Amino acid sequence: AVNVNYRAADFATQLAKLDKDQSYLVHCRSGGRSGQSLATFKKLGFKKIIHLDGGMLAWQEAGGKVEKLPKNNP
């Protein structure tokens, strides 16, 4: 898993370091920020982007399981 902050000033630079031929699942809490990030993925030439429409909230509402790390885990 790679956590890249959409609001970071170097967001596109961070994405550009990733393998554009790999598959990536893009999500956020409600799907807004991750949805907005899709244009940057496309502009950079990523081929396999899967967007979790509605984000983690929709996933949980649909019965999807979520496991949380202990708070002391970085």
Image (cartoon, rainbow, N blue to C red):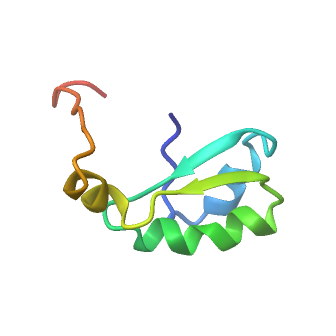
**Residue that appears at 68% across and 61% down:** 12
27 left or right of 68? right
60 left or right of 51? left
- Position of residue 29 relative to residue 4, above or below, is below
How far across and down, in percent of the image, does residue 29 sit? 31, 61
Q: Which of 3 and 36 is in front in this view?
A: 36
Q: In which quarter of the image is residue 23?
A: top right
Quadrant of image for the C terminus: top left
- Report the residue that reaches farthest toward the left: 71
**Residue that appears at 59% across and 53% down:** 50
53 left or right of 17? left
How far across and down, in percent of the image, does residue 22 sit? 74, 38
**Residue that appears at 48% across and 44% down:** 3
**Residue that appears at 52% across and 63% down:** 8
Q: Quadrant of residue 49?
A: bottom right
Q: How many marks?
A: 0
How far across and down, in percent of the image, does residue 10 sit? 62, 60
How far across and down, in percent of the image, does residue 68 sit? 21, 33
